[in-house]
Image (cartoon, rainbow, N blue to C red):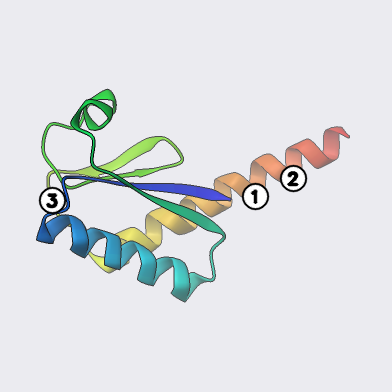
């Protein structure tokens, strides 16, 4: 499962990022958990000074701008591929 965090106070740009994330997850049929992070101290822990921010599997992929839907989809597909590789490696070791 991919963990996605949308960082920001809830402004229109943050809502747009969340909508694009939800659309990409639905269109790709991804197994993902989406979380909104509005606490500034937690946002700063990611090193994000400008919102909105987007974190996928604890990696900041975008900050300070609204990514396109295509960018979000590409990042999500990449995260799924990495996650799948980790699962395959674990299964081979068992």
Residue 89 horizontal side relative to residue 74, left or right: right
Mark linked to residue 65:
3
On screen, residue 43 above or below 35? above
Classify mark 1: helix, strand or loop: helix
**Dot 3: element:** loop
| Pointer 2 with pointer 1, Cβ within 8 A | yes
Residue at the image position 66 percent from the left and 40 percent from the top: 86
Q: Quadrant for the C terminus, please.
A: top right
Residue 1: give x, y in percent of width and height: 59, 50
Can you say whether 74 is above or below 36 in the image? below
Which dot marks residue 88?
Answer: 2
Residue at the disc numbered 1: 84
Under tag 2, what secondary structure?
helix
The answer to whether residue 64 is above or below residue 58 is below
Q: Residues within 10 Å of mark 1 (few under 14, many from 20)?
A: few
Image position, residue 37 (x, y; %): 29, 42
Quarter holding residue 50: top left
* 48 with respect to 21 (left or right): left
Using the numbered discs, state the Cα–Cα distance from disc 3 to disc 2 in whole angstroms: 34 Å
């Amino acid at each position: 499962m991919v963990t996605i965090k949308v960082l920001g106070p809830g402004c229109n740009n943050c809502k747009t990022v969340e909508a694009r994330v939800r659309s990409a997850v639905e269109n790709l049929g991804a197994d993902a958990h989406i979380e909104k992070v509005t606490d500034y101290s937690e946002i700063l822990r990611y090193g994000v000074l400008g919102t909105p921010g987007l974190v996928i599997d604890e990696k900041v992929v975008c900050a300070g701008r609204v990514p396109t839907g295509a960018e979000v989809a590409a990042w999500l597909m990449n995260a799924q591929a990495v996650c799948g590789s980790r699962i395959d490696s674990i299964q081979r070791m068992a």
